[in-house]
Image (cartoon, rainbow, N blue to C red):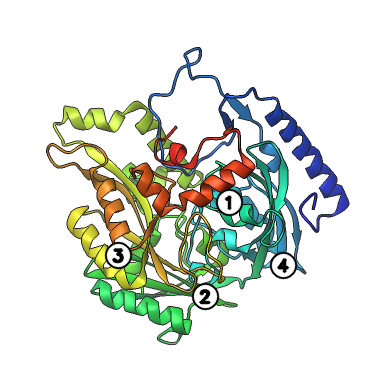
Amino acid sequence: MTGISGLPSAKQAAHDAAVTRLRDAYAAVPAGVPVRLAKPTSNLFRYTRDAAKPGQPGSERAILDVSAFSRVIHVDPAARTAVVGGMTTYEALCDATLPHRLMPLVVPQLKTITLGGAVTGLGIESSSLWNGLPHESVTEMEILTGDGRVVVATKDNEHSELYFGFPNSYGTLGYSLALKIELMPVQPYVHLRHFRFTDPRSCMDAIAQIAANGEYEGHKADFLDGVAFSTSELYLTVGAFSDKAPWLSDYTGQQVYYRSLQANREDFLTIEDYIWRWDTDWFWCSHAFGVQNPKLRRFWPRKYRRSDVYRKLVAYDQKHGLTAVLAEKRHHPPREMVVQDVEIPVDRGGEFLGFFENNVKMSPVWMCPLRLRGDHAWTLYPMQPGDVYVNFGFWGTAPLPAGQRDGYYNRMVEEEVSALDGHKSLYSSAFYSEEEFRRRYNGSAYDKLKAEYDGAGRLLGLYDKCVRGR
C-alpha cells in the first residue's frame, strides 16, 4: 500500500507532492538535531521555562512546516468516511462534515485539538461510552516514521503493530500525515436531560446502568457525561439526537454551560453547539480570567471566548511566572498546577472522587464514561476491552501545604490512580519513575516499536518527552 485508499486522483497527487516535500525536509535535518512541528496551537500542558536561547548550546532545532496537512482532504458522504490531514483541527473537520449531516464518532471537547493529536495523544468525549477513543474509528494511518519512511498502517497489514501502538506515543514514533476515519450520521439537535445525584456511588451505578441499557429513565443515551461539583452534588447529562427542538439555548453568549446543569432539568442545543459546548469557557477555566462575570463578559469579544485563547494566556503566565510573583508579594502560599485526565474503572470511581475531594479539594470535576469500541486492546494504553471506565478531568491549581514542593498533588493523584487500577493521560505533567512508567504504559512493547520505526532515536523517547519534559 502506497497511500491512503479512496482518494480521487487529483487530491491524491496533491497530497503525495506534499508528503514528498515533508519527507525530503525531514531527511535533510542533520542527525542529532531535535525536530519540532510548526503548529500554531497546542493542547499540551507541559511547559518549559528554561529553554535555551538562540546561540546557546541546545538551542538548535529543526522546525518542519506541516501546514499542508492541516485540512480535510476528502469527505465521502456515501461511505461515511473522511481522509484528513493529521494537523487538521476538529473545528475544521466538523465544519467539513456537518453540512453532510455527519460527524466523527468522537469529537474531543476543544476546537483546536487536531485529529493527529487526538490519535497519537488520545482524546475523549461524551460519545466515548459507545464509540471508544478517537483512534478507534481510524481505519488507515499514513505516518512519517522516525527513521524517515512514510508508511500506511492498518489493523491487518504489515504495519499493524504500529497501527495499534501509535495511540499514546505522542509523536515519538512518527507523525501522522493523513488519516482515514469513519463518520456517523447526526440529527440537527441534541436533547439534554440533567440528572442530579447526591453521592458518588449512586452516580457510578447510574453510569453502569446506562452502559448496559443505552438509556436512563426513558431518555436515550447517544451521549453521556457529567460534572461533580462535590461528592454531594453530581450531575449526569444524557443527550439524545433529535430532529426538532421546542427551544434552543446559546452558551456562546452570556450564559455559561456548566452552570446550566444546576439550573435546568433539560435543554436543547444544535448539534454544532453541543459539540463545542465546553470550548467557549474551556469547561469552567475561563472563570480564572473573569470572563464568567456578566459585566466583563459583555465586553469580552465573542471571538475570543475560546479555549485556545485562554490556553495562550496560561502559557504566557507560566513562561513569565506572573501569577507566582504576584502570590509571593501578597504572601500567599505557592500553588501547584493540577491539570490531569485519568480513567478509573466505574466500580472504583466513587473512591476516586472521595479521595480527590478530601486531598486535592478542587472542583468541579468532569466525568466522562468510556469503554473501548472493539475487542482489541491498544498497546501503549492497555485498557481492558468491555470494561467501563470513567474519565475524571480536573484543571486548575491548588495551594501547596507548608514545606511541600511542586508535584505534591500530581504525585498523589498518580499513586491513587495506580492503586485503583486506572490510567492517566500523558498530555500534562507526569512524575512516574521510569520503572513505573514502563510498567503502566507497556515499555517492552514500546521498545520494540521504537527499534522498528525509529531505530536511530531521531525522535525523543516517550519517557523523555512525557515525564522528563524535554
| Residue 41 image offset from top left, x and y in percent | 53, 39
- The tag on residue 287 is none
Distance of label 4 from label 3 (alpha carbons): 35 Å
Residue 263 falls left or right of residue 237? left
Q: Name the amino acid type tagged 1.
A: Phe
- The tag on residue 228 is 3
Pick the residue in front: 448 or 323. 448
Residue pointed to by mark 4: 80
Q: What element carries label 4?
A: loop
x 58%, y 47%: residue: 449
Q: Is mark 1 on a helix, strand or loop?
A: loop
Question: Which mark is first along the chain, 2 or 1?
Answer: 1
In this view, 33 is above or below 306: above
Give the label, 1 or 2, closer to the camera.
1
Q: Name the amino acid type tagged 4.
A: Arg
Give the label, 1 or 4, closer to the camera.
1
Q: Do the residues labelled 3 and 2 touch (CB within 8 Å)?
A: no
In the figure, residue 336 lies in which quadrant?
Answer: top left
Q: Is mark 3 on a helix, strand or loop?
A: strand
Residue pointed to by mark 1: 166
Neighbor class of circle 1 (other Cα within 10 Å; few <14, some 14-19, many 20+) is many
Q: Do the residues labelled 4 and 2 touch (CB within 8 Å)?
A: no
| Residue 199 image offset from top left, x and y in percent | 23, 73
Question: Which mark is first along the chain, 2 or 3?
Answer: 2
Distance of label 3 from label 2 (alpha carbons): 21 Å
Extreme residue in the right direction: 9
x 31%, y 75%: residue: 203
Pick the residue in front: 44 or 273. 44
Question: Which mark is first along the chain, 4 or 1?
Answer: 4
x 40%, y 44%: residue: 428
**Which quadrant of the rendered structure holds the C terminus?**
top left
